[in-house]
Amino acid sequence: MLPFCRAALRKGAGMLKRLIRALFAPRCCVCSGRISEEYIYKEYKNVCICKNCFEALDRTPADSLFPGTRHLDFLTAPFYYTGEYRRIFLQFKFSGFFAYGHIIGQAACEYFSAHKVLEEYDCIVPVPLTRARLNRRGFDQAALLAEHFAEGIGIPVQRALERTEEGEIQSRLSGAARAENIRDSFAVCSDVKGMRIIIADDVFTTGSTMNECARVLREAGAEDVCGAAAAVVLRKPRSEADIF
Ligand SMILES: [Zn+2]
């Protein structure tokens, strides 16, 4: 083959490769653009979040410690539940966009991996769903996120809680009604005596669900209980000195 033919073929192959890469590049879950490799922040199964969109999300400070509840020492979360984050979160939770959940989980994994206080805990316990709700929804969002949290912190997931009562959906109720609705809804189903536990949930709103989980875990002998969520409804973080 003549040298100029080989050069033309190589050039054509290079252009085709670039075209294929542009056409099938992962799509950003926030701006919907096809994103080339150097601009991807996190990726899961051809869905990603680009670096620009990630920078624009409403992130909490590093090592955040938000006020807990009566039975929960504190809460930590990587994002505030606002704007674009809330939008992709709702698509994950209610429309079954699992890739979005994994991207949120990967970002949380990175955040919690740098949070030193969490290393002192023994395990992650996800807030459970009732079997009926799990069957209706088809997946358990807190359990999916808990796997990512656990990977970041370097401790195991322990399914130590089961849901005994379904009650009303918490997000439809006000603060006081939420606490009443969730009371006696959980039971401890494995040995937690002397353990330091991180409860994992998707969003921390009033804290009544995590508080009730923490209450039964402490009653069963857990030594310390705190919470980790993928997002927290806007509130001011406290310093470590205020909590410990
Ligand atoms: Zn984007």
Image: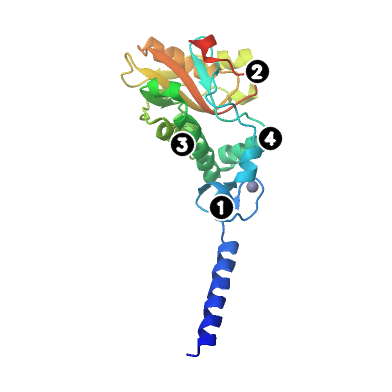
> CB of residue at label 1: within 8 Å of ligand 1?
no
Q: Is residue 164 visible?
A: no
Q: CA distance from mark 3 to mark 2?
A: 27 Å
Under mark 3, the amino acid is Leu
Label 4 with label 1: CB-CB less than 8 Å:
no
Crowd class of label 2 (few under 14; some 14 to 19; many from 20; radius 10 Å): few
User: Mark 1 against mark 2, which lies toward the viewer?
Assistant: 1
Q: The residue tagged with tag 1: helix, strand or loop?
A: helix
* Residue 44: percent from left, percent from top: 50, 48
Let me know if residue 183 appears in the view. yes
Task: Please state the horizontal and vertical placement of residue 125, each as a whole percent of the image.
Answer: 41, 25
Query: Disc number at residue 174?
Result: 2
Task: Answer few, some or many: residues within 10 Å of disc 4's Cα (few below 14, many 20 plus, some between 14 and 19).
Answer: few
Point out the tag, 3 or 1, that comes first from the N-terminus: 1
- In this figure, which residue is indicated by the disc labeled 3? 144
Q: Which is closer to the viewer, label 3 or label 4?
A: 4
Q: Indicate left or right for 172 with 163 as reference.
A: right
- Report the residue that reaches farthest toward the front: 3
Q: Which residue is mark 4?
A: 83
Q: Which structural element holds mark 4?
A: helix
- Residue type indicated by callout 2: Ser
Q: Secondary structure at mark 3?
A: helix
Which residue is tagged 1? 38
How far is mark 4 from mark 1, CA to CA?
25 Å
